[in-house]
Image (cartoon, rainbow, N blue to C red):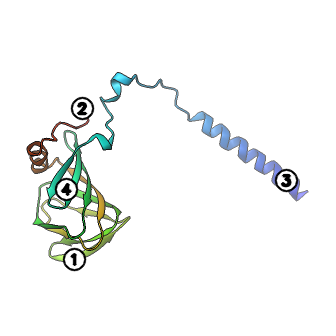
C-alpha cells in the first residue's frame, strides 16, 4: 500500500508542477526585430576600451548606471584612485588583490566587493588573469571619455 501511495503522491506533484509551469508562460507577443536594438545589445558587439595597460573593458551605460565587463591580464595593476560613483565588483574568474583604504583583500571567483563613493582603492594582479563585472552609479565620466578618445563611443543601450 505504501508503494501505491508514493506513486499517487508523485503523480500529484508532477501534475502540480506542470500546471504551475504552464500558468506562468509568457502571453505577450515577441517584439519585432526592428525594435530589438531599442533595449538589447549583445556584449560581443560592444567594443573594448583600455582602462589601464593590461585591463580592457566592454562599457555599457544608461542615464544613471554603468556596467563594465572587464578582463585584466596577469601582472596588471590599478593605481590607487577614488571616484564619485559607488561600485560593486563581481569576480567572474581568477583572482587579484584589491587594495581598499590601504589594506589588501584577496578576491577570487564568486566574490562581490562593495565600494562606497570616494573610497580609495586599487588592484594588483599576479600570475593569472581576472575577469569581473563592475557596476557604477552614477556613470563614470572618465570612462565615457576614455571610450570616446579610443573611438568606441556610442555603443550603449538606446533610450
Earlier sequence position, callout 2 versus callout 4: 4
Residue at image mark 2: 158
Secondary structure type for disc 2: loop
Closest to the observer, 134 or 64: 134
Q: Which one is closest to the eye, mark 3 or mark 1?
A: 1
Residue at image mark 1: 104
Left or right of residue 102: residue 114: right
Q: CA distance from mark 3 to mark 2?
A: 57 Å
Residue count near mark 3 (Cα–Cα under 10 Å), binned few <14, some 14–19, many ≥20: few
Up-down relation of residue 70 to residue 24 (above or below): below
Residue at image mark 4: 86
Earlier sequence position, callout 1 versus callout 4: 4
Residue at image mark 3: 5
Would residue 66 be seen by someone viewing this image from the given angle?
no
Q: Which one is closest to the eye, mark 1 or mark 4?
A: 1
Q: Which one is closest to the eye, mark 3 or mark 4?
A: 4
Earlier sequence position, callout 3 versus callout 2: 3
Secondary structure type for disc 1: strand
Q: Quadrant of the C terminus?
A: top left
Image x and y of residue 139, in percent: 16, 47
Residue depicted at 34% across the width and 69% down the height: 108
Earlier sequence position, callout 3 versus callout 4: 3
Residue count near mark 4 (Cα–Cα under 10 Å), binned few <14, some 14–19, many ≥20: some
Up-down relation of residue 158 to residue 6 (above or below): above
Amino acid at each position: 500500500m505504501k508503494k501505491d501511495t508514493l506513486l499517487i503522491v508523485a503523480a500529484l506533484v508532477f501534475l502540480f508542477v506542470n500546471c504551475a509551469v504552464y500558468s506562468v508562460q509568457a502571453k505577450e507577443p515577441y517584439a519585432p526585430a526592428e525594435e530589438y536594438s531599442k533595449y538589447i545589445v549583445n556584449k560581443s558587439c560592444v567594443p573594448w576600451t583600455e582602462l589601464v595597460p593590461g585591463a580592457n573593458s566592454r562599457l555599457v551605460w544608461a542615464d544613471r548606471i554603468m556596467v563594465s565587463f572587464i578582463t585584466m591580464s596577469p601582472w596588471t595593476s590599478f593605481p590607487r584612485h577614488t571616484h564619485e560613483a559607488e561600485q560593486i565588483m563581481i569576480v567572474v574568474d581568477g583572482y587579484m588583490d584589491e587594495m581598499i583604504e590601504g589594506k589588501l583583500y584577496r578576491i577570487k571567483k564568486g566574490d562581490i566587493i562593495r565600494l562606497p563613493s570616494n573610497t580609495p582603492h586599487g588592484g594588483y594582479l599576479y600570475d593569472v588573469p581576472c575577469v569581473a563585472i563592475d557596476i557604477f552609479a552614477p556613470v563614470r565620466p572618465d570612462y565615457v571619455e576614455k571610450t570616446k578618445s579610443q573611438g568606441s563611443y556610442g555603443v550603449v543601450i538606446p533610450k
